[in-house]
């Protein structure tokens, strides 16, 4: 006789198996783990952000990192990635005193999903749930006791007002970075009392909830226009108190996004890494159009428009992989993002560097909007005003300053660059003479500025040719050669010059700080003239010499202890020799072997880098993730290909970690990568075919991808050093390539 408990156990196991299979077949959400990378290796950790793809409201528990056992608040939204959040929200219960205002709360088990968050609090036994919509959010609070329950609300940036305008309505205004955010909220129980931290100061308050309120719902809308618009956003998106319908809708939106790429094979851990990386690739940019209108910090006006207005883009980080990824998955949105930048130029006078919610944040170096826009144009994304965009890009290059972390009109340093073709560096100990240079940390970054401006100017030249502006094409093609002015042939490496054209000594290319380079050193920036890799090889003495130099990059000693190396270069994490996996300027470097006739070395390096540095745990990101900047590299590389030179629409083939990857394109086409006999050991390509035709070259075009088709790679345990090695198989020089559209 079978015991009843055993029957129950068998039935439960069967039901669980059915549910598990159904989830596996219907959704890739099961693989997303927002805690991956939640402890920063050196710098910033990832945040388990709960949001809809590319939407205004982004919420996360505020704590140091994922090892911190206390939460201070939940922002009602993160307004700008890693910079500004607005409106602090926290439920609490029990007796309150002066310490309550700044109390952090130990939390218990969390459930982290892109569309849903829940946790409990150990001190009180209370718990919390959250789910988002595009411009609104819904907190559901569960109190362990029926009395002395509160909501703590405040502003996060010092100045603002929060008011209880009705027994069940709370509104707020917060000022930050020269603009304002607003919220309108409703709760489903009465407010009993309101306590302010300071008399007549409404920026922090405790809202006492009515007795017998064990479960309390708090729904809210966010706006950058007005409280009334925040109310309208809430009404449009969360019209009732059905938390589960909000959660289900958010889940459906994410399921649709994740269904665009399906994989088979690989390990469960690799799937978690892959789909979590895809999730992070949807955090930015965000559309802040609020049902027909938006506030722009670029002219401080409210604009009527039915088009999206996207903000929050760190283009130095994102032109490399994030924007190219969305050009494949979401070409219409990718175009709208560029159109938003053009609107910002029309409103503010410059194409922004980092287009944040509060205006241009002139971080980093380069005019990479030019690369981004050229990349889109030559991939056939042409529904934007190229003439207006070109005028802005040209102005940024010739009439705006190139100084890192600065914007506005050009300076004497820019005049020097325009005349001499390089940014002059200062000698060690030499005092800065140009006031606009950011001191003491960022400095001139003279070599990086020269190389990166060369690349962006090359992209401007290509756009000038499209517009048939021959005189500009000639000008910018000449400027595209400037990177050669900071390559020291006798040393075989990038090197700073002073304003007299003399190489700066003493100088060690391993230890150079931001006097000469951006977040890295010469070993990384040796390979940053992406628009002229073959020209770079010639400077190094030819392809064989360049290959040896590239090999040595992964072997070069740091020259000092790691902690001293990181003292001057904290972004240089994920080190393999002098190669820096944890920072964006390195992402293309392993793929350069395909330009040197040694694609098997790309296959070897990429698999090693993915397996080593991108894992499914709290330490699974080797550097600053930058809101999709690094994760999009992971998505591409795990699929088995990567674009070395944005602006040239071809992809170098790497080594996919999955047996099959299928990308569903927006027009109904599908592109599939099949890796036969694939494994960690069998990482080398033996043979390849594209749409049934033998493929001897280690690259394919963007058109090959978007037209749909199948790339088949036969894998083996030993490198096939002949595949992709002939001169005729190499990717064409960027200057020679013209896509057929």
Image (tube, grey):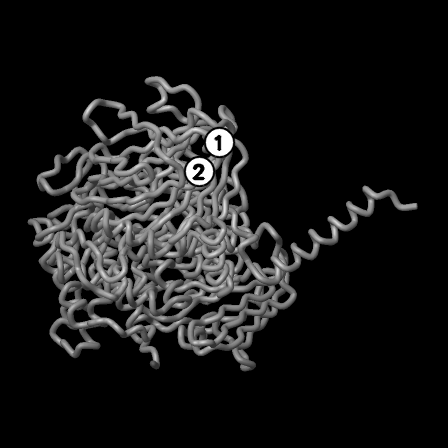
Q: Nearer the viewer, residue 348 or 41?
A: 348
Q: Nearer the viewer, residue 37 or 227?
A: 227
Residue 464 spot, x, y in % from top left: 18, 73
- Can residue 105 be seen in this snapshot? yes
Residue plotted at (28% across, 50% down): 231
Instruction: Give the crowd class for mark 1: few <14, some 14-19, many >=20 residues within 10 Å.
Output: many
The residue at which mark 2 appears reads as 216
Residue 489 picture quarter: bottom left
Instruction: Give the crowd class for mark 2: few <14, some 14-19, many >=20 residues within 10 Å.
Output: many
Mark 1 near mark 2, Cβ–Cβ under 8 Å? yes
Residue 37 spot, x, y in % from top left: 47, 42
Task: Say above or below: 30 vs 542.
Answer: above
Q: How many marks?
A: 2
Sequence-wise, which precedes: disc 1 or disc 2?
Answer: 1
- Can residue 573 be seen in this snapshot? no
Q: Nearer the viewer, residue 525 or 641?
A: 641
CA gap between label 1 and label 2 equals: 8 Å
The residue at which mark 1 appears reads as 143
Residue plotted at (41% across, 49% down): 132
Farthest right residue in view: 1
Residue 645 picture quarter: bottom left
Task: Say above or below: 219 vs 703.
Answer: above
On screen, residue 153 versus residue 253, left or right, reads left
Which image quarter holds the C terminus?
A: bottom left
**Secondary structure category for the residue under label 1:** loop
On screen, residue 713 versus residue 560, left or right, reads right
Residue 665 spot, x, y in % from top left: 45, 72
């Amino acid at each position: 006789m079978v015991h009843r408990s055993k029957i129950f156990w068998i039935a439960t196991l069967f039901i669980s198996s059915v549910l598990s299979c159904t989830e596996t077949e219907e959704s890739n959400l099961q693989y997303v783990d927002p805690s991956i990378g939640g402890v920063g290796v050196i710098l910033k950790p990832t945040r388990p952000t709960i949001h809809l793809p590319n939407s205004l409201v982004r919420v996360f528990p505020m704590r140091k990192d994922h090892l911190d056992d206390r939460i201070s608040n939940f922002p009602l939204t993160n307004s700008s990635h890693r910079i500004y959040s607005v409106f602090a929200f926290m439920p609490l219960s029990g007796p309150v005193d002066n310490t309550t205002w700044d109390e952090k709360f130990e939390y218990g088990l969390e459930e982290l999903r892109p569309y849903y968050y829940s946790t409990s609090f150990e001190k009180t036994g209370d718990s919390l749930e959250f789910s988002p919509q595009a411009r609104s959010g819904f907190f559901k609070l569960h109190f362990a006791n029926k009395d002395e329950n509160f909501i703590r609300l405040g502003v996060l940036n010092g100045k603002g007002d929060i008011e209880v305008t009705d027994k069940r309505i709370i509104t707020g205004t917060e000022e930050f970075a020269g603009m304002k955010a607003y919220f309108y909220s409703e709760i489903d129980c009465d407010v009993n009392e309101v306590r302010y931290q300071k008399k007549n100061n409404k920026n922090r308050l405790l809202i006492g909830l009515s007795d017998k309120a064990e479960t309390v719902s708090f729904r809210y809308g966010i706006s950058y226009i007005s409280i009334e618009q925040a109310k309208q956003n809430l009404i449009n998106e969360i019209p009732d108190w059905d938390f589960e319908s909000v959660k289900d809708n958010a889940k459906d939106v994410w399921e649709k996004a994740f269904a665009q790429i399906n994989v088979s094979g690989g390990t469960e851990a690799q799937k978690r890494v892959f789909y979590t990386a895809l999730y992070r690739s949807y955090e930015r940019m965000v559309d802040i159009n609020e049902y027909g209108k938006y506030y722009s910090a670029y002219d401080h006006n409210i604009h009527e428009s039915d088009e999206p207005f996207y903000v929050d883009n760190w283009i130095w980080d994102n032109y490399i992989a994030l924007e190219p990824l969305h050009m494949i998955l979401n070409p219409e949105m990718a175009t709208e993002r560029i159109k938003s930048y053009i609107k910002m130029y029309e409103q503010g006078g410059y194409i922004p560097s980092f287009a944040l919610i509060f205006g241009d944040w002139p971080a980093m170096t380069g005019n990479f909007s030019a690369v981004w826009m050229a990349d889109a144009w030559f991939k056939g994304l042409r529904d934007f005003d190229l003439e207006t965009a070109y005028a802005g890009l040209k102005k940024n290059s010739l009439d705006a300053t190139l100084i890192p972390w600065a914007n506005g009109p050009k300076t004497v340093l820019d005049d020097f660059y325009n005349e001499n073709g390089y940014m002059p560096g200062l000698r060690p100990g030499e005092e800065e003479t140009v006031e606009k240079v950011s001191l003491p940390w960022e400095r001139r970054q003279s070599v990086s500025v020269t190389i990166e401006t060369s690349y962006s100017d090359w992209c401007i030249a290509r756009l000038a040719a499209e517009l048939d502006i021959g005189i500009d094409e000639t000008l910018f093609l000449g400027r595209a050669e400037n990177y050669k002015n900071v390559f020291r042939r006798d040393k075989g490496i990038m090197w700073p010059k002073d304003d007299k054209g003399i190489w700066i000594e003493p100088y060690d290319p391993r230890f150079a700080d931001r006097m000469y380079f951006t977040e890295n050193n010469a070993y990384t920036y040796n390979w940053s003239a992406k628009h002229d890799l073959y020209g770079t090889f010639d400077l190094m003495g030819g392809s064989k010499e360049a290959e040896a130099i590239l090999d040595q990059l992964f072997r070069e000693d740091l020259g000092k202890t790691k902690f001293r190396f990181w003292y001057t270069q904290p972004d240089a994490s994920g080190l393999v020799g002098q190669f820096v996996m944890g920072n964006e300027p390195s992402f293309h470097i392993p793929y350069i072997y395909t330009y040197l006739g040694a694609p098997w070395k790309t296959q070897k390096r990429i698999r090693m880098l993915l397996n080593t540095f991108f894992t499914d745990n709290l330490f699974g990101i080797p550097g600053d993730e930058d809101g999709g900047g690094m994760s999009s590299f992971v998505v591409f590389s795990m699929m088995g290909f990567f674009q070395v030179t944005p602006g040239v629409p071809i992809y170098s083939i790497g080594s996919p970690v999955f047996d099959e990857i299928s990308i569903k394109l927006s027009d109904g086409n599908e592109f599939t990568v099949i890796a036969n006999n694939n494994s960690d050991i069998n990482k080398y390509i033996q043979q390849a075919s594209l749409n049934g035709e033998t493929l001897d070259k280690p690259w394919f075009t963007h058109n090959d991808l978007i037209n749909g088709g199948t790339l088949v790679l036969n894998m083996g345990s030993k490198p096939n050093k002949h595949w992709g090695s002939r001169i005729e198989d190499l990717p064409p020089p960027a200057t020679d390539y013209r896509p057929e559209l």
